[in-house]
Every structure is written in structure tokens, then in C-alpha cells.
Amino acid sequence: MKTTIAKHLLNIKAVTLSPEEPYTWSSGMKSPIYCDNRLILAYPELRKQVAEELVSLIKMHYPEADVIAGTATAGIPHAAFIADQMNLPMCYVRSSAKAHGKGKQIEGLTERTKKAVVVEDLISTGKSSIQACQALQEAGVEVLGVAAIFSYGLKKGTEAFEKEGVSFQTVTNFSTLIKEAQESGTISEQGLSLLKEWQQDPENWGAASFSK
């Protein structure tokens, strides 16, 4: 199923590859890959399939979950689909507390909530996922782990999760996607090589060739 979902993400251009003309992320870092899983929402059959795969991951790895926690904003709709399928409560976690009203960072949390699974659309460095986990833990909730649609498979992200002692599972990932892209003829051998080089050293990749 990892390959099937990866193929769909490529087909709808939720994940696009451009190794010869890389994207510039908001951080300023050059990247040969760009992920916008919000596009999944526009395809009813795919969003249902993704939700079913996330439900399967949660049932397999985090069966004790009593709440589904979406990260704001991209994780919220997927968390809603999952919570509905599993008949579980749902909450969502902002990147920071509101500056007005009750100043909440977590919405939908109740005293009955004990064990949560955090739902993300994408894992890169792991920063946003871990911030959500920490916010829940500070609120007295045990975080069982994170379930995400896609991961870039970056070493920095894996190390961040390991440091926090938080596990994560994904529906599909970078290695599966680039293999599918190669087999379908979406990228060349040179492009594949550039993508692999980027994954090994994303911060410095392309600094000499692409920086302007």
C-alpha cells in the first residue's frame, strides 16, 4: 500500500520532484522535492484511502489511543476523518497558544483524554510534530506516537523523535516515492541521484550549484 499511495501522491502532484531546478523552502533551504498533502482533500477516494491507512497504522501500533490529535493546520482534516472512522474524540494542537480568549493551544481536550495519537500530514525535521507532542504532555496527556501521511526520511527528523522518545509511523515515505518515480519514468537516473544526495545532506545540498 505504501507504493500505491506514493503513486497517487505523484499523480495528483501532492508531491512534486524537481532535482534540476530545486524549490526554495521558507527556511531558504534548496530542495528537489516539495510536498503539499493538502491536495489530498480535493480527491474524495484518495483522502478516504489515506484515512483508512492511517487508521490501520493507529490500530496496529497505538491501539490504546482514546483521542486523535491533529496538528494545525494540515493535520486537522485527516485527524477528523480518522476520529470519525474510529469513533474516537478528536482535538487539535496549535503551534502556540492563542494570544486572546482563553489562550488555548489545544482545542477539544477533555478530562477524559489520557492517551493520544498525533496526526500529521508530513514529517520533515519533526519539529512541529514534537511541539504538538510536548504540548499534549504538558497538558497531562500520554502521547503514544505520531501517525503521518508522508516522511522525507531525514536523519535530523529521526534523531529528533528518538531524542524525545516518541515513535512515528507513516503511510508512505521518500524512498518508496522516488522508487515509484523512477519506475514510472517521472525522474531520470541523474535526478534520482540528486534526490538521494539531498536526503543525505539536505542543509548543504546544492549550495554550490544552486545558490544565487
Image: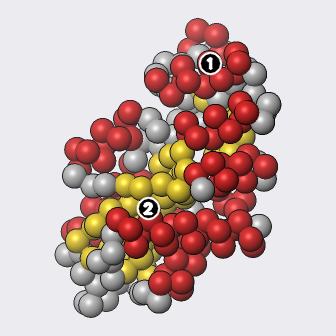
Q: Is residue 13 above or below residue 140?
A: above
Asked if residue 30 lies left or right of residue 109, the reply is right
Amino acid found under the numbered disc labelled 2: Ala
Asked if residue 177 lies left or right of residue 131, the reply is right
Residue at (30% x, 38% y) in the render: 159
The answer to the question of whether label 1 and label 2 lie on touching residues, with beta carbons closer than 8 A, is no
Q: Is residue 103 visible?
A: no
Quadrant showing the C terminus: top right
Q: Is residue 149 above or below residue 188?
A: below
Q: Is residue 112 above or below residue 53?
A: below
**Residue 210, percent across and down?**
65, 15
Q: Which of the 4 quarters of the picture holds residue 195?
A: top right
Q: Which residue is mark 2?
A: 147
Its colouring scheme is secondary structure
- Mark closer to the chain start, 1 or 2: 2
Q: Which residue is mark 1?
A: 193
Q: Which residue occupies the foreground of this view, 80 or 8?
A: 8
Distance from Cα at disc 1 to Cα at disc 2: 29 Å
Q: Which residue occupies the foreground of this view, 87 or 134?
A: 87
**Residue 82, percent across and down?**
52, 77
**Residue 105, percent across and down?**
37, 72
Amino acid found under the numbered disc labelled 1: Ser
Q: Is residue 163 visible?
A: yes
